[in-house]
């Protein structure tokens, strides 16, 4: 049997490669096992192929977890600026989009190549097409059966992610392993996912492809970004964001005119009594969306002929339009997974299991979920570094 590794890392995604690189460069003998044919598959499709690799505003408030304090330690010790320095050290050109989102000018492949180069510096072995069929723990060592070969290590890192985007090979294997070792799992569910509409709201599917800047709210959490109507319901950044806070049965409220201000419709009536609600909405929103909103409100007359009470009601409805999603598009379309291995089981400083010495969990496998816009990559880097520095 070969000499035991210091650590076996399951999963060559963002967190796994980052953790491997850090541990390898500290002189640890590290093996990364990846079941796919190449590392970093989710990195490569992220950000439209340009990888939204971090967000300069990333902080604990941008993450959802059963323990909102858990992510503080790792995020404080490895910041967006730290990762940006790494990116710039490799000469990777980048640009900032809206709301602090950082992207490669070129290809997401540059980020994967950078991580693999970092792993190579630490003599990390990355083995793809590795079919892990069993993991055992005995006498302070982990035995992993991969492609029919037993491999021994003193530490094991679960970095296999969650079940979002199954077409990329994503599974819930992290949770199987956690349960095997007696670790609690917070029920996983799709996050950053489009929501579906049914009933009378199916009418909105007729404007599939139409988008508008709005404020979307679910469970008192609001995001000011674009909403997109689809052939199945609601999507776009604002909807993906609130989907992480939405629960089945809850409404999603949309303010279609966030710049309108209170009393704007009565003011328009005084300024131009011959104007109609439709003409005003068409100035602010795409025509098809304006038309369907007016049809739903039922206010077709000129403003001068409309009672103030009706205008106030229309204004209020436009600022708090209540949709009632009947579900989401599930893990197939979810960008990430909420829930996962309970943070109560892990050290926030090292990501190591409190009950199984040498067992670690990082990245999306853990019950820490970021907002849309580079936050989940920052958690991958930060949690990977926390474990890599502790191995």
Image (cartoon, rainbow, N blue to C red):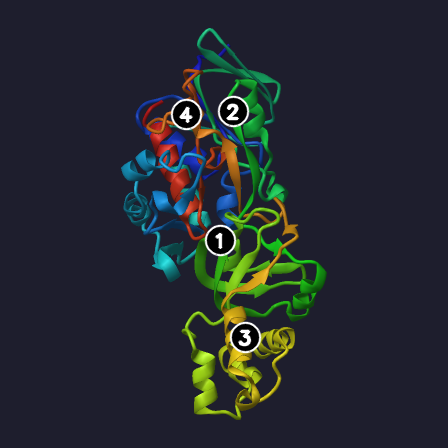
As measured in the structure, the alpha-carbon distance from the residue carrying label 2 to the one carrying label 4 is 10 Å
Is 160 in front, or is 34?
160
Q: Secondary structure at mark 1?
A: helix
User: Residues at badges 3 and 1 in contact (C-beta under 8 Å)?
Assistant: no
Q: Secondary structure at mark 3?
A: helix
Considering depth in this image, is 252 or 355 the residue closer to the camera? 252
Q: Is residue 119 visible?
A: no
Residue 100's quadrant in the figure? Answer: bottom left
| Residue where numbered disc 2 is placed | 184
> Residues under labels 4 and 3: Cα distance?
51 Å
Residue placed under numbered mark 3 in the picture: 314
Q: Is residue 150 above or below residue 236?
A: above
Numbered label attached to residue 346: 4
At horizontal 50% and vertical 92% (from top left) the residue drawn is: 273
Q: Residue furthest right?
A: 199
On the image, the x and y values in percent for residue 288 come to 61, 76
- Residue 84 in the figure: left or right of residue 126: left
Q: Secondary structure at mark 2?
A: loop
**Dot 3 alpha-carbon crowd within 10 angstroms: few under 14, some 14 to 19, many 20 or more:** many
Q: Earlier in the sequence, mark 2 or mark 4?
A: 2
Which residue lies under the disc numbered 1?
241
């Amino acid at each position: 049997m070969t000499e035991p590794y210091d650590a076996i890392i399951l999963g060559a995604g963002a967190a796994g490669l980052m953790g491997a690189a850090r541990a390898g460069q500290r002189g640890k003998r590290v093996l990364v096992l990846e079941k796919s044919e190449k590392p970093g598959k989710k990195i490569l499709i992220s950000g439209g192929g340009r990888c939204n690799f971090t967000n300069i505003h990333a902080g604990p408030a941008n993450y959802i977890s059963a323990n909102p304090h858990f992510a503080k330690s790792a995020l404080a010790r490895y910041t967006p600026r730290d990762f940006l320095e790494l990116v710039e050290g490799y000469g990777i050109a980048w640009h900032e989009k809206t709301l602090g989102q950082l992207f490669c000018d070129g290809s997401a492949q540059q980020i994967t190549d950078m991580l693999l180069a970092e792993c190579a510096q630490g003599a990390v072995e990355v083995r793809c097409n590795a079919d892990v069929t069993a993991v055992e723990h005995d006498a302070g060592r982990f035995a992993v059966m991969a492609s029919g070969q037993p491999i021994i290590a003193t530490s094991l890192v679960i970095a296999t992610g969650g079940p979002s985007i199954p077409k990329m090979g994503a599974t819930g294997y992290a949770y199987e392993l956690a349960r095997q070792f007696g670790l609690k799992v917070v029920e996983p569910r799709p996050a950053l996912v489009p929501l579906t509409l049914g009933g009378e709201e199916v009418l909105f599917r007729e404007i599939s492809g139409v988008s508008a800047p709005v404020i979307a709210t679910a469970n008192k959490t609001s995001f000011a970004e674009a909403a997109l109507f689809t052939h199945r319901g609601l999507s776009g950044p604002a909807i993906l964001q609130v989907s992480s806070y939405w629960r089945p049965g809850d409404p999603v409220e949309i303010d279609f005119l966030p710049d309108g201000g209170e009393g704007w419709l009565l003011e328009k009536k005084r300024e131009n009594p011959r104007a109609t609600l439709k003409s005003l909405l068409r100035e602010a929103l795409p025509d098809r969306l304006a038309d369907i909103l007016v049809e739903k409100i039922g206010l077709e007359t000129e403003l001068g002929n409309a009672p103030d009470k009706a205008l106030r009601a229309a204004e209020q409805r436009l600022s708090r339009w209540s949709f009632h999603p009947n579900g989401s598009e599930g893990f197939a379309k979810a960008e990430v997974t909420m829930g996962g291995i309970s943070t109560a089981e892990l050290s926030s400083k090292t990501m190591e299991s409190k009950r199984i010495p040498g067992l670690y969990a990082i990245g999306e496998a853990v019950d820490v979920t970021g907002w849309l816009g580079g936050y989940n990559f920052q958690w991958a880097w930060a949690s990977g570094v926390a474990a890599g520095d502790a191995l």
